[in-house]
Every structure is written in structure tokens, then in C-alpha cells.
Image (cartoon, rainbow, N blue to C red):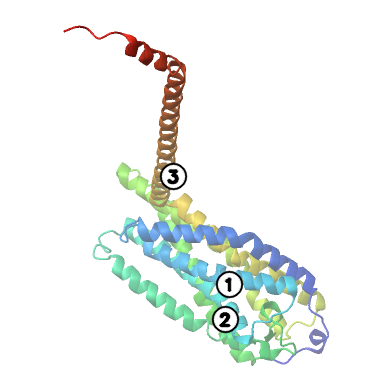
Amino acid sequence: MPADNSSENCSDPSMGFQASLYAATYVIIFIPGLVGNSLALWVLCCFIKRESKAVVFMMNLAVADLAHVLSLPLRMYYYINHTWPFGSFLCQSCFYLKYFNMYASICFLTCISIQRYLFLLHPFRTKSWNYRHDVAVSAIVWIMVGAACLPLPILRSPSLTNNANACFADLGVKQLTRGASVTLMVVAELSGFLIPLAIILYCTWKMRQSLRDSHAPLQQADERRKAWRLILGCAAVFFICFTPYHVNLPIFMMVKQGVFGSCLVHHHVLNIHTVSLCLASLNCCLDPILYYFMTSEFRQRLFRHNGAAFLQRFVHLDNSRAAASTAKEDEEEEEDGKRSENVLMAYFRPFRPQRLENESTVPPLSP
């Protein structure tokens, strides 16, 4: 798109605001995201059956979150030091992981919602479905999202800027033709936002309607209520983390392509883009909360195994202390016995020679 002259004269917002917000956000979410997703992956892989409650999709969601979380220290380094000494390849890899995590998370949240809806409201249609089908769907999601995100490092790369040490928010944007820009935006918004949003909203609405069925058995009603809470949690994460970014994305691309001439619009859109990207990274912390509060089996397994491990460690420590205390008491008793024996020997020692001398002076009895 041709750039508007007035847009070209607009300077970008202060890098201090962007860098401070990005750095603060990544510092806040790094430890909770790392611990929460690692713990979630451990529980989901080791202690929950693959056939139950979309666990395969949750495992893949945790892997996608971990991939992004592990790149956060490099992002923190850049936004704190304002320089990138690690080379172009690592910069583009971290940049790629950000969007790869975003769209993989969107797809897996959608898959979780679809599966819970189908399994509870259409059980006969999904009777032959098992965890192998979940694995196949997950593989397709990884391949499709990975391929769809490949153009991103081409559109934003260090070669498009004059600064070799620039990365992330400071990367230049490749100028595209109007047709290519429109096509890219339509595909990204439809496949990455509008269609998943419509599916999640539909599943949430249908599950909510099913709860009003008073003729459903008590156990089935309870399962539907749990599934509705899980789908509602997926919808909440989707709205909080991904909706602001995708609402602002078309306007952001038009600003970068020079469509808007107003510097005020230019500054506001770029600032909103920064905030929306920070919100998008929050899903790394919100997804483990989703597993914990919306999935009773995950919560039970986590408490059971962590509680058992803690109890076993406590009992082992208590037994060790008891054994050490017993050994110490035995040692003290032994020392007391030796001390008493020494006192008695010291007391009777003066009498022993006299007794032997008296015995030697007694005449022997005559035969």
C-alpha cells in the first residue's frame, strides 16, 4: 500500500512505554507460567487417563504455553537492555513462537470446547472416538498452525530496519500491496479468530441450554455442569487474551501500511497493540488455572499425588528423627551404664587389697 505522507511523518510512540510494559508483563508471567504449565503437564501426562475429558488437547495446550514461556527471558533481556546481541535467527525464532503459541492456544481451546460439547450432548455420534483421534487432531493442528505462522518472520524481520540489534516490537514491517494485505487480514481474522470464536460461543450456548433440561439424570446433569464450566473457562480465556489483539489487528496493519494519516490515530493504535500483545501472553498463566478450577479430576489427582508425596516425605522425615532420637537415647543409656560401673569400681577398689590380705592370713583348715 502506498504510504500517506502525513503518516510517514508520524513518529512511533515512546519506546520507553512499550519496553516497560512488555518487560513488566513478561517478568510477572514467567515464573507462574513456567511452574503452572510444567506442573500441569506432569499431572496430565502421568496421572490422568488419555481417554478422559480432552486431556490430550490440554497436554498440547500446556506444551504450546511452555514453548512461549521458555522464550520470555530473551524478551525480558531485550526490553530491559534495548539491544539484541543474539543474532537474527534467534530473534525471528522467538518472534515466531509468540504467534505460534497464540494460534495453537486458540485451536486447542476450540478443540476442548468441541469435544466436551459433542461427548455430552451427542454421545452416540462420538461412541467410536478415542484418544488416538485426539492425537491425530492435535498433530493436524500443530502442522497447520506451524505452516500458517511461517510468513510472519518474512513480514517482520531485522533486515527491514536500519538497526541490526533491533528485535520484536522494533522490527520493520514489509510493505505489501493492497490486495495481499486484505487477503492476509481476511484469512488471519477468519481462521484465527472469528471461526473459533463462533464455535466456542455456540458450544457454550448449547451446553447452557442443556443444563435447563430437568429430565436429565442427576449424574448426567452434574457432568454437563462440569463441561459447561470448562467451556465457559475456555471462552473467558479466549475473550480476555485474544479478542483485543484481533480486534485491533486490522487497524494496526492499516496504520503500518500508511492508510491513516492522523498521528493521533497512529499513536493510539500502536499503544493498544502493545497492550493487546501483553494480554495475549497472559494465556500462559490462565490456562493452568483453567485446568485446576474447571477440571475436578485434575484437581483431585494433583492433591492426591502431591499430598501423598508430602505425606511420605513427612513420615520418612519423622521416622528418621525417631530413629535418630532412639539411637541417641541408647547411646546415652550406654554411657550412663559405663559411668555407673566406673563409679562402683572406684568405690570398691580400696577394699579389694585389704580383703585379699586378710584372706592370706587366715590359717588353712585342718583336714
The amino acid type found where label 2 is placed reads: Ser
Q: CA distance from mark 1 to mark 2?
A: 9 Å
Residue 21 image position (x, y, % from top left): 72, 66
Q: Of label 2 and label 3, which has the lower sequence position?
A: 2
- Mark number, residue 71: 1
Image height of 187 relative to 221, above or below = below
Q: Nearer the viewer, residue 263 or 67?
A: 67
The amino acid type found where label 3 is placed reads: Phe
Residue 232 image position (x, y, % from top left): 48, 55
Seen at 29% across and 69% down, the residue is 132
Q: Quadrant of residue 8?
A: bottom right
Q: Given this view, does label 2 or label 3 mark the residue nearer the observer?
A: 3
* Mark 1 Cα-neighbour bin, 10 Å: few <14, some 14–19, many ≥20: some
At mark 2, the secondary structure is helix
At mark 1, the secondary structure is loop
Q: Of label 1 and label 2, which has the lower sequence position?
A: 1
Q: Are marks 1 and 2 in contact (CB under 8 Å)?
A: yes
